[in-house]
Image: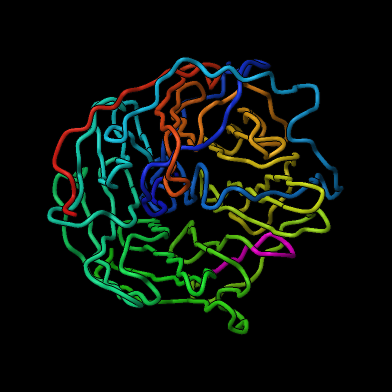
Amino acid sequence: MAPGEAVGWAPPRPHGDGGSGGASLETGSFGEEPQRLASPVGGAAPGRAPASRGRRTPLLAVLGLAVLVGGASAAVALIGQSHPAPPVTPPAIAPLLPADAIGHLQMYTQTTGWAQRLSDGAILHTTAGVERWTVASPPSAKTPLVVAHLDPDQARALTVAAGAGAQATLQAWSTQDGGATWARQGTLSVQGFNGSIGPGVLDFVDAEHGWYSQIEAASGVAGSALYRTVDGGARWTEVAATSPGAPATPGVIPQGCAALTAAFVSASTGWMTGTCLSGTPPFYVTHDGGTTWTVTTLSPVPAGALEETSFSPIFVSGRDGTVLTENDSEAGITTSLFATSDGGLSWRLQSTTAGQASTEDFLDAQHGWLVTDEDGVGSAPDLYATSDGGSTWTHVNAFPYEGLSLDFLTPTEGWAADDLGQDESGPTYLVQTVDGGRDWTSVAPRISGASPSP
């Protein structure tokens, strides 16, 4: 996930991406080592901008097609047919025990970063690398509902303070010292919440401006509500909402789509993404902090879509960003990557491929990684890399780990860990690479400290 944005915690459930062998990734000079920015959620630290990285919820439906180059449209294959995925022989890496499994990994340096324990959602912090973690949850707080990392030391969190039935109260927290101490902020009353840990996204662009996207379940259909704070969580206001089945209201969150969540790049500008049963990928933009929304067209897209999904954009600077979309039609699933270099004013199609994407990560406007499953029916996914903003991709290797999201720190060094919020079954891994993803080795994290209150 990108710094500053996080999805809600869910119990252990790895699932993911597999593969082996293949064309090598050119890890020569990618330029100077990129610095991490306090994402669109973060503050002003060097690094990435707002965006949920890794497998987004529900990252099982995505992408479109064709590219606009100099005004001319051209369909660009994301992965050439000359690089078929070899048979998968997973390395002999034992999965982690539930008590040791971690997810929602965000490393800022080789030694400093954040994560969450999968067994109970405890917030974790490290200053000693991915093998040693300390529980850093708010004191006497229940399991965190959602967490947002601003930088190596600052984070925001929401916990369930009270509630049952159709209403609940959430408590906001903030830390400036890696979770060693937490300050209580304000409370947030939410409707259509059943009092238990539920899904959602917490996004901060700086220490003061943040949003909580709540996904509400009603009669088996998901609606959305968006809450905003401009004072670090002391006060929250509902700025937009949908009710499943209600008529559309111009300028407000669009109706007819499921699980819409927001990601911001500044205090005013952000995007709403999710899944719709037909039409184009849902991609709505706001320039007033989330009060009003207008549609942004990502085109061209395949015809005959049965379901369209868009995932939160990843910004690596105030101007450069990417977004994945997925198209599910009778002809199969296709995935597309769109890019912007003007802060989201316009988006161009970079590449498309058959199959679905399971996770992706970008260091800067040019260098990124993508895990795809070409047939989307249980075959082993493969890892690809790009050095030209996603116009062309090189097959790096197979990636036989289910449900893991990527977290690259440099062009050669990165990790893959559970991304939270998917299945609750299957093995869980924490793996790392030092050669751009060609080879992966297991990491066995050690966690110390008290757990959150039940």
Q: Is residue 126 left or right of residue 286?
A: left
Q: Is residue 127 visible?
A: no
Identity of the residue drawn at 62% across and 81% down: 248
- Residue 208 rendering spot, x and y as whole percentages: 31, 62
Q: Is residue 31 visible?
A: yes
Asked where in the image residue 210 lies, by quadrant, the reply is: bottom left
Asked if residue 7 is positioned above or below residue 377 in the image, the reply reads below
Of the pair 232 and 331, the residue shown nearer to us? 331
Of the pair 305 and 78, the residue shown nearer to us? 305
Is residue 283 located in the magenta-colored stretch of the structure? yes
Q: Is residue 321 left or right of residue 325?
A: left
Of the pair 47 and 86, the residue shown nearer to us? 86
Identity of the residue drawn at 63% across and 15% down: 21
In the rendered structure, which segment of residues is drawn in magenta? Answer: 276-286
Q: Is residue 64 left or right of residue 146?
A: right
- Residue 102 rendering spot, x and y as whole percentages: 34, 36
Total labels: the figure holds: 0
Identity of the residue drawn at 49% across and 70% down: 224
Identity of the residue drawn at 23% across and 32% down: 133
In the rendered view, how is the structure colored? rainbow
- Residue 1 rendering spot, x and y as whole percentages: 45, 44
Asked if residue 257 is positioned above or below residue 2 in the image, the reply reads below
- Residue 373 rendering spot, x and y as whole percentages: 66, 35
Is residue 289 located in the magenta-colored stretch of the structure? no
Q: Quadrant of the C terminus?
A: bottom left
Asked if residue 86 is positioned above or below residue 206 in the image, the reply reads above
Q: Is residue 57 left or right of residue 441?
A: right
